[in-house]
Amino acid sequence: MPIRRACEVVNFVRSSYYYKSRRDRQEFLRMRIKDISQTRIHYGYRRIHTLLKREGWKINHKRVLRLYREEGLQMKKKKPKRRVSVKLRQIETLPKSLNDCWSMDFMSDQLFNGQKLRILTIVDNFTRISPALGIGFTFKATEVIDVLEVAKKRYGVPKCIKVDNGPEFISKELDLWAFTNNVTLDFSRPGKPTDNAFIESFNGKFRQECLNSDWFLSLEDAKSKIQKWRLEYNEFRPHSGIQNMTPKEYLNSINESVLISTS
């Protein structure tokens, strides 16, 4: 029986038959926001909004923020430290392409039993891609070079690498590797983490989203979880500094632009 005839028989308004509750859709959206927040506990409402748009939701960030607040999902904001004075320093030239400049640093963590871990972090300052991460109990200069060789095979050789004055970075072995590969080692000033701001930002995300969130049972377990996070960071996590793209998406968009301009 046609819908029109059926509605007439039971004295039912046809518009009510076709009506779809907005509330149902809003509840689905609310549930999805909660799901993302529970699995990505360090994502704020802006990053959640980016993921929802990726999934096809046609919503603005204000509605996401309202539902985010109603569900009590707000993240605590860090209070900025007060500084008595700030010295101005010369503004450095920003990188303009992949491999213009990398940044490299060491971080510390531990296994569940208290055994210390060291993690070598590397990031490309332009695309924000992490070409490689090294994990071990100790690190010699030769092991730093091994990680750099892995990164080199994946993305090529950088023109410059920003590092601090740690013993592994001022070694003869690393200096020889840099000379052989035509790489400039740019050493930061002691006590000036702002000289290497890109890696400091990366390390903060890495600490918050991986090291502080995971429990490492062994060295192999740490390697597996840390490398899994690196892939997620490169291929899934939206980055506000690169138009809310992932580092991989940003790199692909640049490569496409180059192909179009040269064709």
Image (tube, rainbow, N blue to C red):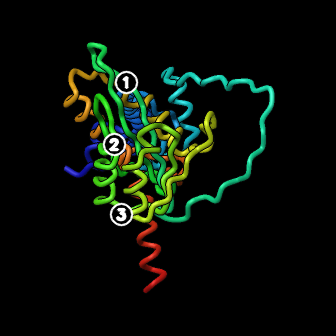
Q: Amino acid at mark 1?
A: Asp
Contact (Cβ within 8 Å) of mark 1 with mark 2: no
* Distance from Cα at disc 1 to Cα at disc 2: 14 Å
Contact (Cβ within 8 Å) of mark 3 with mark 2: no
* Residue 52 seen in the figure: no
Q: Earlier in the sequence, mark 1 or mark 2?
A: 1
Judging depth in this view, the residue of 101 and 213 nearest the camera is: 101
Q: Which mark is residue 133?
A: 2
Q: Is residue 172 above or below residue 39?
A: below
Q: Is residue 5 above or below residue 204?
A: below
Q: Is residue 169 above or below residue 156?
A: above
Kindly identify which residue carries mark 3: 156
Coordinates of residue 173 in the picture (x, y in percent): 37, 49
Q: In percent of the image, x 37 and y 27: which residue is there?
A: 211
How many residues crowd mark 3 within 10 Å: few (<14), some (14–19), many (20+)?
Answer: some
Q: Amino acid at mark 2?
A: Leu
* Residue 243 seen in the figure: yes
How many residues crowd mark 2 within 10 Å: few (<14), some (14–19), many (20+)?
Answer: many
Q: Earlier in the sequence, mark 3 or mark 2?
A: 2
SS class, disc 1: strand
* Distance from Cα at disc 3 to Cα at disc 2: 15 Å
* Distance from Cα at disc 1 to Cα at disc 3: 29 Å
Kindly identify which residue carries mark 1: 109
Residue at the outermost top position: 113
How many residues crowd mark 1 within 10 Å: few (<14), some (14–19), many (20+)?
Answer: some
The C terminus: image quadrant: bottom left
SS class, disc 2: strand
Q: In percent of the image, x 46 and y 73: which residue is there?
A: 257
Coordinates of residue 102 in the picture (x, y in percent): 47, 53
Q: Is residue 70 left or right of residue 136?
A: right
Q: In percent of the image, x 53 and y 54: which residue is there?
A: 243
Q: Is residue 157 left or right of residue 79?
A: left
